[in-house]
């Protein structure tokens, strides 16, 4: 079973759940590039070349790793035999640093070399408009670990390419120029997340990536309309932040307020738009009580350094909020879940459709809420047809996010099923990690008869907590670093050039997690009862389409794919009320033709979401 462990990194206390590993009896058995600690002392070290290296603080650690999944526990006696080799410095290219008592800002190169960034314009050219969020203070006592190269100041982005620098140093071993111990294997030396050898890491604040199945040469996704299936992976560093825009206000408070649970991009929308470089439109859901759908234009996003709403552009309404349920989902009335996806005409259809999926928090066997989940309607938000079952699958696993699958990939691996659908339900009822299935309702009629069972192809499905709860069984098949607190509320299949990634957006639990209220485990709780974690952040998960292809082809189990990278959204989000804030982000949508990723951040602008925009380069 899992035990609670306190991790000390140079006096820093971190809480985590850790599964103990088997005994290591000799130094020669420790792989180079491994995180190590003793079974009786909580300090964590990086091991390489027969020495251990110290992480001075939490910030330094998290420039190299997302979590402690690569941690190896050894005996106190064995740890004592390993001499300390020095301190670990910030990962090159990851962030900017400054000494606590000085205003000078530096970029980090390999070996802890610092280069002075001489102007705000230079910092912006390297890290974008949000460069200020990437500046970390290094305490005076740790600044001696670095060396300032005064001969090479940085005047522009051409003097220092952060993406190239980041990709060039993926391990502490590389950073320090260490030589692997001849007696040790080289496993685990190429990871900033889970220790897979030879992986590449990503940039962007709070992002990291791992090797293993997420190797940067093994993806299998395609761009819509392309004749080839992509062969490389999108990294978080490929996402260039463009800014934010606001949503239309409503007089009755029942429009976008408390909305943002579903969204999809429509390429033909806003035909008379302003020509501002953001074509098309977005369909999205409004107030969570009714989940009505509206279509809006896409204004140019803007970055406000002072987070001033008045500086942002506002979308305009193209179609007002409309009830698209068509009377098919009336039993669903408590904590409703909804998904939207646009596809052009399929099969015998003569026009494109807006695909719908509805569910709710409780849909138990034998209840009137256990009803078919999927439907479609016309783009004018009328003529809803359905509802249909995703055949044979847990209702909690299929009805909270949808998106289009690139045509060539769907043809090759999913029998032409172009519509991806899935859900994550807290507590692991849907599976202990996000789920994903490929379906093609148009193959069953135009429209299919009500109650039709649509046959899916499974792409991703972890064990449910009913089958094997990770709280009681450490061998349960879960997503790495899983918490019952997690909420994955959006998903998209990103493509750009020859790169691709399947991305899930949501709120990730960190540290410990428990069932009770915000203060700890309880059944008779004083405050809101549910699943809680020590800390919760907005996050993107990046999955390798090649892993999903292997599941579809039957060469991998549905629970085997794992995220190869993550992106911490904290630097971009405006609504931060506490470290234990739930529901940090909502749905996402992707404009494949132009490479724009859109994300809802709920409850910011008088209870309306904001829309964040990235360009996938």
Image (cartoon, helix red, strand yellow):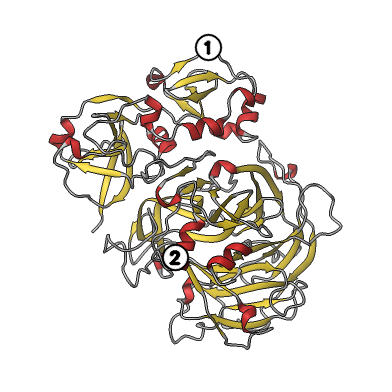
Indicate the position of residue 163 as horizontal and vertical percent values.
Answer: 55, 34
Residue 392 falls left or right of residue 465? right
* Closer to viewer: mark 1 or mark 2: 2
Q: Name the residue under label 2.
A: 551
Contact? badges 1 and 2 (CB < 8 Å): no
Residue 309 falls left or right of residue 62? right
User: In the rendered view of the protein, which quadrant contains the C terminus?
Assistant: top right
Q: Residue furthest top?
A: 151
Indicate the position of residue 52 as horizontal and vertical percent values.
Answer: 26, 30
Q: Which residue lies furthest to the right in this view?
A: 272
Indicate the position of residue 500 as horizontal and vertical percent values.
Answer: 57, 52
Residue at 64% from the left image edge and 19% from the top image edge: 155
**Observer able to see residue 607:** no
Q: What element carries label 2?
A: helix
Indicate the position of residue 229 as horizontal and vertical percent values.
Answer: 58, 56
Residue at 32% from the left image edge and 45% from the top image edge: 70
Give whichever of 179, 161 is nearer the camera. Answer: 179
Check disc 1: other Cα within 10 Å, few if <14, some if 14-19, many if 20+. few
Q: How many marks?
A: 2
């Amino acid at each position: 079973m899992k035990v609670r462990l306190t991790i000390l990194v140079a006096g820093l206390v971190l809480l985590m759940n850790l599964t103990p590993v088997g005994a290591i009896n000799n130094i020669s058995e420790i792989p180079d590039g491994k995180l190590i600690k003793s079974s009786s002392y909580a300090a964590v070290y990086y091991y390489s070349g027969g020495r251990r290296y110290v992480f001075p603080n939490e910030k330094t650690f998290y420039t190299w790793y997302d979590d402690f999944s690569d941690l190896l526990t050894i005996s106190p006696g064995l740890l004592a035999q390993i001499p300390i080799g020095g301190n670990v410095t910030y990962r090159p290219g990851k962030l900017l640093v400054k000494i606590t008592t000085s205003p000078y800002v530096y970029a980090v190169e390999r070996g802890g070399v610092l280069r002075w960034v001489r102007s705000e314009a230079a910092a912006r050219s390297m890290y974008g408009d949000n460069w200020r969020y990437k500046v970390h203070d290094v305490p005076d006592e740790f600044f001696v670990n670095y060396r300032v190269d005064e001969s090479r100041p940085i005047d522009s982005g051409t003097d220092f390419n952060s993406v190239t620098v980041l990709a060039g140093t993926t391990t502490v071993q590389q950073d320090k120029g260490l030589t692997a111990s001849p007696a040790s294997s080289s496993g685990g030396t190429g990871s900033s997340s889970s220790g897979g050898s030879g992986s590449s890491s990503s940039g962007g604040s709070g992002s990291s990536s791992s090797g293993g199945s997420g190797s940067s040469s093994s993806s299998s996704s395609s761009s819509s309309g392309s004749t080839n299936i992509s062969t490389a992976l999108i990294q978080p560093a490929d996402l260039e932040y463009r800014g934010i825009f606001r949503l239309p206000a409503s007089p009755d408070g029942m429009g976008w307020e408390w909305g943002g649970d579903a969204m999809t991009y429509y390429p033909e929308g806003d035909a008379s738009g302003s020509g501002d470089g953001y074509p098309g439109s977005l369909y999205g859901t409004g107030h969570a009580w009714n989940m009505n759908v509206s279509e809006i234009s896409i204004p140019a996003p803007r970055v406000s350094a002072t987070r001033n709403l008045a500086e942002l552009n506002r979308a305009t309404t193209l179609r007002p909020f409309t009830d698209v349920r068509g009377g098919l989902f009336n039993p669903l009335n408590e904590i409703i879940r909804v998904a939207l996806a646009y596809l052009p005409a399929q099969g015998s259809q003569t026009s494109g459709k807006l695909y719908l999926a509805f569910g709710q928090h409780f849909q138990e066997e034998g209840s009137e809420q256990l009803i078919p989940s999927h439907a479609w309607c016309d783009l004018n938000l009328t003529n809803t047809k359905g509802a249909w079952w995703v055949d044979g699958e847990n209702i909690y696993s299929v009805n909270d996010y949808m998106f289009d699958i690139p045509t060539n990939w769907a043809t090759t691996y999913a029998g032409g099923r172009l519509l991806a659908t899935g859900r994550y339900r807290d507590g692991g009822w849907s599976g202990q990690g996000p789920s994903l299935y490929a379906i093609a309702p148009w193959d069953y009629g135009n429209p299919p008869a009500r109650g039709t069972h649509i046959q899916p192809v499974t792409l991703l499905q972890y064990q449910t907590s009913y089958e094997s709860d990770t709280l009681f069984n450490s061998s349960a098949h879960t997503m790495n670093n899983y918490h019952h607190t997690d909420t994955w509320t959006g998903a998209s299949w990103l493509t750009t050039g020859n790169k691709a990634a399947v991305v899930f957006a949501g709120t990730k639990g960190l540290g410990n997690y428990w069932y009770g209220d915000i203060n700890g485990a309880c059944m008779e709780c004083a405050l809101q009862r549910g699943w809680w974690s020590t800390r919760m952040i907005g996050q993107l998960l990046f999955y390798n389409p090649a892993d999903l292809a292997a599941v579809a082809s039957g060469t991998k189990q549905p629970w085997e794919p794992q995220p190869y990278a993550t992106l911490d959204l904290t630097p971009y989000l405006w609504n931060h009320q506490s470290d234990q804030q739930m529901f940090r982000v909502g749905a996402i949508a992707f404009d494949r033709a132009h490479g724009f990723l859109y994300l809802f951040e709920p409850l910011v602008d008088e209870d309306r979401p904001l829309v964040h925009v990235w360009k996938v380069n």
